[in-house]
């Protein structure tokens, strides 16, 4: 066999080995998550969120049971898979977490601005994550179908698309650097392509999720905040228009994908 043929054969074997190893690793991670799912700590956050949803709290000593998340006062089933969306009463686009803050302020008397300034996982901000987990779980198994009828919904999709591909920061990264094409991974983590529909329970359809690596429950706001941190961008404020727009872009792209929330992540 000629030297060039030997080299080509070696490259093909190496490529096959790498692809096989990657597939095997991905399968192993999937099995690991499947085993953890039976004892997913997210269920504890869901239970806490249900208690907080029904409990009379705040200066007005009221519950959140009349909170309108887009399906009518108190209706949580199916609400998560249609957020973010435009809300007429606030005149702006809101995702689930920012909408919950509105309800906590209007119904219970909390100061939404002060809560938004808290660190993730602290005080009432931790309660927002728990409530969001409870609300999102009520839509488990349902398909994403974000509305695009209002002009602001359409505009925010386009803004989110531009933000997704915008490169900046010390490393000249964008969201698309990691999530703009197929077959990418970082360390042992597959990176879904979020420019189209990534499939059931992937990407946008998997958060809120419990992070095993740091024993924390993460909502989409924290997920996006951490993505910006890893890109070496300034971290966005809670409920910023940038994070809402990115949520709209990813959520609309995920149309038809099945929600598996609350999921479990590495």
Image (cartoon, rainbow, N blue to C red):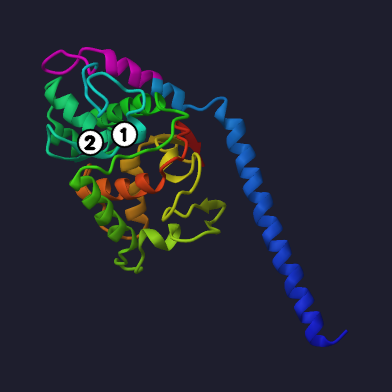
In the depicted structure, whether residue 28 falls above or below residue 231: above
The image quadrant of residue 127 is: top left
Q: Which residues are magenta?
A: 47-64
Q: Position of residue 160 (x, y in %)?
A: 28, 54
In the depicted structure, whether residue 149 falls above or below residue 127: below
Describe the element under mark 1 as helix, strand or loop.
loop
- Residue 121 circle label: 1
**Which residue of the protein is positioned furthest toward the right in this rendering?**
1
Q: Position of residue 114 (x, y in %)?
A: 14, 34
- Residue 253 circle label: none
The numbered mark, 1 or 2, whose residue comes first in the sequence reads: 2
Describe the element under mark 2 as helix, strand or loop.
helix
- Residue 242 seen in this snapshot: no
In the depicted structure, whether residue 63 falls above or below residue 14: above
Within 10 Å of the Cα at label 1, are there few (<14), some (14-19), or many (20+) other Cα atoms?
A: some
Q: Quadrant of the N terminus?
A: bottom right
The mark closer to the camera, 1 or 2, is 2
Residue 28 horizontal side relative to residue 95, left or right = right
Residue located at (64% from left, 38% from top): 31
Tell which of 213 and 256 is nearer to you.
256
- Residue 98 circle label: 2
Residue 179 horizontal side relative to residue 238, left or right = right
Task: Check contact, mark 1 vs mark 2: CB within 8 A.
Answer: no
Residue 224 horizontal side relative to residue 6, left or right = left
């Amino acid at each position: 066999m000629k030297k060039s043929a030997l080299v080509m054969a070696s490259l093909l074997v190496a490529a096959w080995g790498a692809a096989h190893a990657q597939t095997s690793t991905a399968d192993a991670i999937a099995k690991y998550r499947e085993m953890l799912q039976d004892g997913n700590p997210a269920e504890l956050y869901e239970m806490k969120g249900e208690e907080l949803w029904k409990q009379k709290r705040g200066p007005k000593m009221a519950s959140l049971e009349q909170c309108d998340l887009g399906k009518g006062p108190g209706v949580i089933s199916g609400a998560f898979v249609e957020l973010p969306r435009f809300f007429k009463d606030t005149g702006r686009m809101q995702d689930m977490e920012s909408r919950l803050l509105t309800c906590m302020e209007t119904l219970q008397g909390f100061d939404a601005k002060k809560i938004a300034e808290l660190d993730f996982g602290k005080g009432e901000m931790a309660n927002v994550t728990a409530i969001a987990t409870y609300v999102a779980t009520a839509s488990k198994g349902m398909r994403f179908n974000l509305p695009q009828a209002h002009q602001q919904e359409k505009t925010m999709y386009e803004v989110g698309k531009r933000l997704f591909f915008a490169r900046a920061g010390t490393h000249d990264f964008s969201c698309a650097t990691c999530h703009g094409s197929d077959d990418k991974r970082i360390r042992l983590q597959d990176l879904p392509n979020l420019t189209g529909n990534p499939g059931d329970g992937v990407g946008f359809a998997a958060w809120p999720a419990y992070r095993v690596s740091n024993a924390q429950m993460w909502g989409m706001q924290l997920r996006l905040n951490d993505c910006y941190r890893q890109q070496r961008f300034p971290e966005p404020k809670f409920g910023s228009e940038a994070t809402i727009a990115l949520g709209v872009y990813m959520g609309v792209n995920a149309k038809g994908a099945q929600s598996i929330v609350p999921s479990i992540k590495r």
